[in-house]
Image: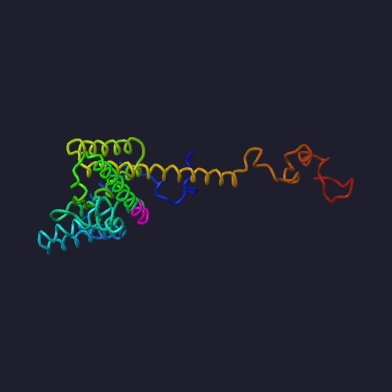
Amino acid sequence: MVAPASTRLRTPWTRTTDLGAELHAALTWLRAPGLWRRVLPAIRAHLSAAPASTAYAFTLFITWWTLRGLGEAAQHRLILSASTNLYNMRHNPLQVLVASAFWTDGGFPWNTIVSFLIVMAAAERWLGTARWILVYSAGHIGATLLIITGISRAIDANLIPHRIGYASDVGTSYGFTAVLAVLAFRFTGAVRVAWVITLGVVLGLSAWEAPNFTNYGHICAAIIGLIVALVATTFWHFLDRAESLRRSGEHGGHGPEGDQGHSPEDHQGHSPEGDRGHGSAGRRDNRPEGAPTN
């Protein structure tokens, strides 16, 4: 049963969209006259509706600029101090869980910044800022904890060298992957299935070609995102159906339950006694007996 639009709860988990309709709307917007006059206002509106993603991208630029002004040795020490490796997670877990998400190792992270301004901003506009932060945090923290647990057990079992516990590990990819998985639930049907399959194939091939803990973490983050989205959509669709049934019960009045609570007078004109009101025996008025009728 699909709830009417008037009874749908205000949550993104029950608001899906048609990919074909969105692409058609985008092409129509691009083909409309005055494109160059509309581009900057559209970009401004897009970014202002996604403050967390925009601020995140700006923070990544600031941290890259900070590293750029340091020497190579200082850069290495700073990245190691913010890494979610086994050593740091045992000594400063909260600090590195937060700090690691705002640093990138390597050159200018233009692809990460552009991805945040486009993909993550679109996800935030759909989910809302608070939900976007929760999903991103769940992917980043959850995947990190799973990978650190695996590293710890592998080191204890002498399956990997101890130096892995001191390796640098910073970046935005775990949270990004979790949100990317959740975006599949913005669509329905074949598009959602294709989205999930494509994401799984890409992550699986990456882990097969380079079987390291970072790629395994991406798979964990994607699974976390899918679980979060599945639980949330199931929960809100249940509430949506319950709300629809409640409102139908209040306003429908159909069936035996809908007729309860009415007195016999409410049914006059429908019962045998009420039907006599259309004949001479059932008519009651103030005319004297024997007076002429019309």
Rendered location of residue 186, percent (x, y): 35, 44
Above or below, comparing residue 24 to residue 87 in the picture: above
Give the number of callouts. Answer: 0
Q: Report the predominant secondary structure element of the magenta stretch.
A: helix
At 52% from the left and 45% from the top, the residue drawn is 244
Rendered location of residue 59, percent (x, y): 23, 61
At 30% from the left and 38% from the top, the residue drawn is 196
Instruction: Please say whether residue 115 is visible from this viewpoint.
Output: yes
At 37% from the left and 56% from the top, the residue drawn is 130
Residue 279: quarter of image: top right
At 77% from the left and 37% from the top, the residue drawn is 272
* Color scheme of the displayed model: rainbow
133 inside magenta stretch: yes
In magenta, the rendered stretch is 128-134
Above or below, comparing residue 27 to residue 272 in the picture: below
Rendered location of residue 206, percent (x, y): 20, 39
Q: In which quadrant of the rendered image does the C terminus lie?
A: top right
Nearer the observer, 224 or 127? 224
Instruction: Please say whether residue 221 is visible from this viewpoint.
Output: no
Q: Residue furthest toward the right?
A: 289
Nearer the observer, 137 or 36? 137
Above or below, comparing residue 178 to residue 103 in the picture: above
Nearer the observer, 232 or 104? 104
95 inside magenta stretch: no
Rendered location of residue 91, percent (x, y): 28, 56
Nearer the observer, 105 or 111? 105
Q: In the drawing, does residue 162 fall left or right of residue 9?
A: left
